[in-house]
Structures are given as structure tokens and as C-alpha cells.
Image (tube, grey):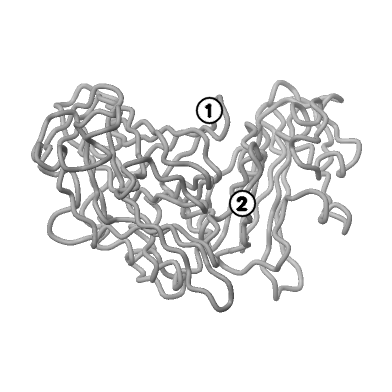
Amino acid sequence: LDMDSSDSNMLKEAIEVCNLMAYQTSLELYGVASFVLVTALEGPGCFKFVSDSDGGKGNNPSFASDVFVPLEDMDRAVRDNVLPNAVSLSFFSGTNGFELTLAVEQLDSSSDQGRNFLFTAMTLEDISTSGLCPTTTPVLPPSPPLSPPPAVPPLQLQARPYCGANKIVLDFVQASTPLNNLGALGPTPNAPFISSNSFLSSSDVARTGIYFSGIGKDIVAGSESGAADEQAFDLYIVNKTRYTPSKTDLNGKRSGKGDFGVINMLSSTSTVLEFIFVDPIAGERHTTRSSYAIWFLDMDSSDSNMLKEAIEVCNLMAYQTSLELYGVASFVLVTALEGPGCFKFVSDSDGGKGNNPSFASDVFVPLEDMDRAVRDNVLPNAVSLSFFSGTNGFELTLAVEQLDSSSDQGRNFLFTAMTLEEVLLSNLC
């Protein structure tokens, strides 16, 4: 704690460490903006943490227990002044210690000064009351069970969608897209399907979207002797603001091979999309009975990183990049925004065919079973967005940010989720 600077940010505290299982700043723990800068270094689980805010008595912690509490119980002064200067370093079981480098970096020629590095850990009482760590020893990747959450919990980056006895699964391979007409721009308007579909023909949503039929199952386990209750649902995606594509024929299911949905976007444009879960029998929105995750893969850039894919979303339960999932450095930049569970994800690496995923199932495996090319090239461009149970969909904004005046280009946003088989095999939830 108390990772701060002095002398107008010219004297900085820094830590370098390798073989981390995970790290959390206030951003990952609670969604509170952090004053600690994080840089990935060469080597397994290697990172550098540097203070980036002038300190003072106001941010000196009195007791570690002031921080080891749920966010809603935390003193406001601690939340605003102490928490942003904290970082948690997690290590694997089966070790007998660790090494790290402490440094006080002096950026000018001022006189020598001393800095104190304060370190601590949770007591047994802190562990039982803080809600900041799983109750079982995590493995790589960590997979603590998550019960249905309270109405407004703090975002916890290490949380996983609950998919034990109850689970949400989506299968893009088995799904069909009888309607593919986002923004009324084609390529498949299919008026007869709209007329025959009980949801589209009766609801007040625009009929100009992409409809994935037969894609989902909401599974709730029965008693020991009873069968599971499975509710089938469809997915309908509709734009709520102007949508500008480059090639609409790329929308829908990815052609050729791959278990992905695709939204094609033109550079220098953005659109707000609503993802709606549909009960095809009742003709109503389907309310989920478990939390769930939607994955975006191939989050990359082009034109020497001048053309960037970006996603903005609110009301997240959690997010995970490759860093949080596996300790593999991510090429996706994350920024906390104003609002509950609001974040922006931006690509930060030039793409190419080498990082295009073939199948989502290539990623939905334990790290030790993952192909090296997938681990090095595909995984760092992925982000998983987890949403709460009791919802019938979500909204997000997709954008292609053009940082120069080059000619217009198109970018594809690839999204997917885990099938039932992948849920059972991947150990990711």
C-alpha cells in the first residue's frame, strides 16, 4: 500500500516481480481508478508497478483492515486516497517464497530522500469478511464458484460466470441466421421470417437486425433424481444508433469456418448495439437464470496501430483479458469509465492473418493444452465480458477509431461464447 511519489511526481516508488499468478490494482478489484502504472515485462508473469501520484499524509493508510472490506463498507477517504495507491500480488501454491525488486526512481537532480514501501497481507478475519479472494486455493486459471450476485456488487475482475450445475451456453455452429439485416442494410431482410416470428412480429424493437436462431440454452439443474430444466433461447442484435458497415455480407455467422458471430464496421464510425435474448415460443425476452460471458476475439488494429477496434460497455459483472485469465500479456487496453461496471476496451497491436482465430474452441482450453501459436498470437487479442443473471441482454458500443487520415477501411468484430462441451472442458468458469 501507499505506492505514491513525491517532489511533484519526480521521485517514484517501483516494484518489479516475475512468476505472478495475478495482480490487482484498485481498478481490477473495485473498478476504482488506480494511481499505479502497470507494465508487462519479458518473462513468465513478469510486471513492473510504478507510482504515478504525489503522496501526502492524506493517502497514508492507518490499518490494512481499512482496505480489506467490501467497497460499500469502505470509508470514503480510504476509497478516494488510500485504495488507488494499492496493488495486490498473487503467487501460486507450491512455492516457498518469491523475489522482487524495489526501487525509488529519481527523475531529477533533487537531494536524496527516503521512501517507505509498506506491505501486508490479510488476516484470517480479513479473509472471511473482505470478499476479495476465493475461498479455495486457485489454480491456473483461477475458477472460484460465483453464486448469484447481489443487486449492485463491486466489479471483481477475478469473478467468473457461474456455470456449475446451472449455466448459460451458446452455440454459434448450431445457430442459423434467418434474418441478417443490421441497420436495414442487408444482405438478408427476410420479411416472411419477420412475419412468422412471434417476437419480431409483436415487440416494439426494430426489425432491422441480425437474428441467431437456436443458439442458446439456459440450463438449471434438477434434483438428484430429476432432469435438468433446459430453456432454449435465440439471440437478436439490433442497432440503436446509426450503423455504417464496410461489407454487410460479412455480418452474421463467419463464413467458411469458425464458431463466431461477426459485425462489420467502417473506420471512423461507431454504433450502439443491443443484444437481446429471445424466448422463441413465448415471443418474449428471455431472462437469464445464471450469469454468462460473451467473448470478443481478434481485437486488433491495422495501419501501424492507427486504426483501432474499441468496445464500450456498462453494467459488467467482470471482464477478463488474457492477462487475468492466464497471466499472458494482453494487447487490449482497458480504461474504467464513469458509471456502474463501465469500461472501454481498445486494441493496441497491429493484426494480421497470424492472429485470426480459426475456432473459439482453440481458446476455450486449459493453457497447458493450448496451441503455442494460439497462446502467443490469438489469446492476447481476446476479452471476455461477464454479465449478471436476471438480465435479458445487454448494450455495448462498437467503434473503429481512426487516428490518421488514411482511406476508409472495414474491421470485423468477432464475438462468441462457450458451448456446453467447452464449459465442461475449459475450466474458465
Residue 422 higher or lower than 7, as above or below: below
Residue farthest bottom in this picture: 225
In the rendered image, which residue does mark 1 sit on? Answer: 337
Residue 19: which quarter of the image?
A: bottom right
Q: Is residue 348 rendered to the left or right of residue 224?
A: left
Q: Nearer the viewer, mark 2 or mark 1?
A: 2
In the rendered image, which residue does mark 2 sit on? Answer: 148
Horizontal and vertical percent for residue 308?
A: 31, 35
Residue 54: which quarter of the image?
A: top right
Q: Amino acid at mark 2?
A: Pro
Q: Is residue 167 rendered to the left or right of residue 245?
A: right
Q: Is residue 312 rendered to the left or right of residue 3?
A: left
Residue drawn 72% across the image and 45% down it:
103
Closer to us: 92 or 256: 256
Horizontal and vertical percent for residue 44?
A: 54, 63
Residue drawn 38% across the image and 59% down it:
217
